[in-house]
Amino acid sequence: MTLLQLNPSIPVQTPKGHGLAIFVNELSEEHNMLWTVIIDETSEIWTFQNPQIRGSKNITFGRLSQYPKKEV
């Protein structure tokens, strides 16, 4: 098990809205990473599995949309 404090924190989009990821917890190679996020709007702290979150929009780094369209 590895717990990593993110410094600086990472802006992410979650099912609860935009937030800042502050910790990543990797339980093992057979589990999803767990991201601990402070939600911007409510200041609540939630933990999300890796497939539930995305990096926030960032024009500088070429992320122009929240969720890229999946190719079929």
Image (cartoon, rainbow, N blue to C red):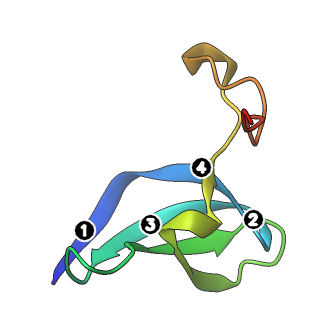
CA–CA distance in space, label 1 to label 3:
9 Å
Mark closest to the chain's N terminus, 2 or 4: 4
Instruction: Relative to 56, say whether 46 is above or below.
Output: below
Q: Position of residue 20 (x, y in %)?
A: 58, 60
Q: Are marks 3 and 2 in contact (CB under 8 Å)?
A: no
Label 2 amino acid? Asp
Q: Report the amino acid beneath label 3.
A: Ile
Q: Do labels 3 and 4 touch, CB within 8 Å? A: no
Q: Which comes before the other along the chain, label 2 or label 1?
A: 1
Mark sitting on residue 11: 4
Q: Earlier in the sequence, mark 4 or mark 1?
A: 1
- Within the image, what quadrant is residue 24 found in? bottom left
Q: Spatial distance from mark 2 to mark 1, Cα to Cα? A: 21 Å
Q: Is residue 31 above or below residue 61?
A: below
Whether label 4 touches label 1, CB < 8 Å: no
Q: Return the residue at label 1.
A: 4
- The x, y position of residue 9, in whole percent, is 45, 54
* Mark positioned earlier in the residue sequence (3 or 4): 4
Q: Which mark is residue 40?
A: 2
Disc 4 marks which amino acid? Pro
Quarter of the image where the N terminus is located: bottom left
